């Protein structure tokens, strides 16, 4: 089986988008809970010790971008006096527990593979959250769920979405994700392409053609907002994410001076040529 192509480029912007905590105190608290979970695991003592040491190392080296470490496994092995194989095996075990997530990276300079970004996961992303959250955290989770329900209710009430069920099931409108947007694949994975397709759809329904730079600028704004929602703990379905991306893109097209001017020009042209029923330029409008 062929190895999947590495899409994510190692950069400060990528590491910033992968951040999973707002404060060092939050990171420390979650790591303490994960250590308790590891200590209770039914595995060999040596495996526990290695896992605890690696997790502590990752925590200490993920303070610049909270929760994110980009040092190579050889560096971890050298610092902890372990073998590379042991570090790799333990990281895979921690990833299986949902404690960390590893993202394969490539350098922007030569597009060759570089060290993985290893991200310590927040509690709200774990299925067994209720087993390890404190009582106060449970209350916070309930508030977050209520906000999410309110948000989704507002989303379904948006009336200007020109999308039907058939539209949402269409294949992506683009062949590839632009290089400057590939960092978002760390959050959206294979959905990045279809989400970018919704930016294209918004432009098409807006009735004007914009250049790629404008389209990618708008995609940045839409994707950043989606990332914010994910970090807030909002669990959006694929269809809901598509609607959010489309809505933000359409509103951006309405608000931008450059695209607004294009739309006004098209409206003006149609108005001025209404009387030319049989004019070749009028056909198809």
Image (cartoon, rainbow, N blue to C red):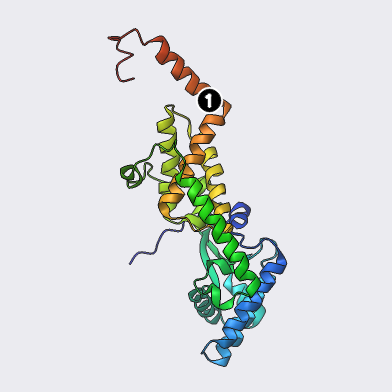
x, y percent for residue 202 = 44, 36
Q: Residue furthest bottom?
A: 45
Report the front residue among 43 and 117.
43
Name the residue: 48% across, 46% down. 155
Tally of numbered tags? 1
Q: Quarter of the image holding residue 147?
A: bottom right
- Whether residue 285 is visible here, answered yes or no, is yes
Q: Is residue 281 above or below residue 168?
A: above
Task: Please identify the quadrant where the N terminus is shown.
Answer: bottom left
Residue 52 vs residue 187: left or right?
right
Q: In which quadrant of the rendered view does residue 130 lie?
A: bottom right
Taking the spot 48% from the left edge, 75% from the top edge, the residue there is 96
Disc 1 marks which residue? 260
Q: Is residue 285 above or below residue 75?
A: above
Seen as rendered, the residue at the extreme left is: 278
Please identify the quadrant where the C terminus is shown: top left
Q: Position of residue 277 (x, y in %)?
A: 30, 10
């Amino acid at each position: 089986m062929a190895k999947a192509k590495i899409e994510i480029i190692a950069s400060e912007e990528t590491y910033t988008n992968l951040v999973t905590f707002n404060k060092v105190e939050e990171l420390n608290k979650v790591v303490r809970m994960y250590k308790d979970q590891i200590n209770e695991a039914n595995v060999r003592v040596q495996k526990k010790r290695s896992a605890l040491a690696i997790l502590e190392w990752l925590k200490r080296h993920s303070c610049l971008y909270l929760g994110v470490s980009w040092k190579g496994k050889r560096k971890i092995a050298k610092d902890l006096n372990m073998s590379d194989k042991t570090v790799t095996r333990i990281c895979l075990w921690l990833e299986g527990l949902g404690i960390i997530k590893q993202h394969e990276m490539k350098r922007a300079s030569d597009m060759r593979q570089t060290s993985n970004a290893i991200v310590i996961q927040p509690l709200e992303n774990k299925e067994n959250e209720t087993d390890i959250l404190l009582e106060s955290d449970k209350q916070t989770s309930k508030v977050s769920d209520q906000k999410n329900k309110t948000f989704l209710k507002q989303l379904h009430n948006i009336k200007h979405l020109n999308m039907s069920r058939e539209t949402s099931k269409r294949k992506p409108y683009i062949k590839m994700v632009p290089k400057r947007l590939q960092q978002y694949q760390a959050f959206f994975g294979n959905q990045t392409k279809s989400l970018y397709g919704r930016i294209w759809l918004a432009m098409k329904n807006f009735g004007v053609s914009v250049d790629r730079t404008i389209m990618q600028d708008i995609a940045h704004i839409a994707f950043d907002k989606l990332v914010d929602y994910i970090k807030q703990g909002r669990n959006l379905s694929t269809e809901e994410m598509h609607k959010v991306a489309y809505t933000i893109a359409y509103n951006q097209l309405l608000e931008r001076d450059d695209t607004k001017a294009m739309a006004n020009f098209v409206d003006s042209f149609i108005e001025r040529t209404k009387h030319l029923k049989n004019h070749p330029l009028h056909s198809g409008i």
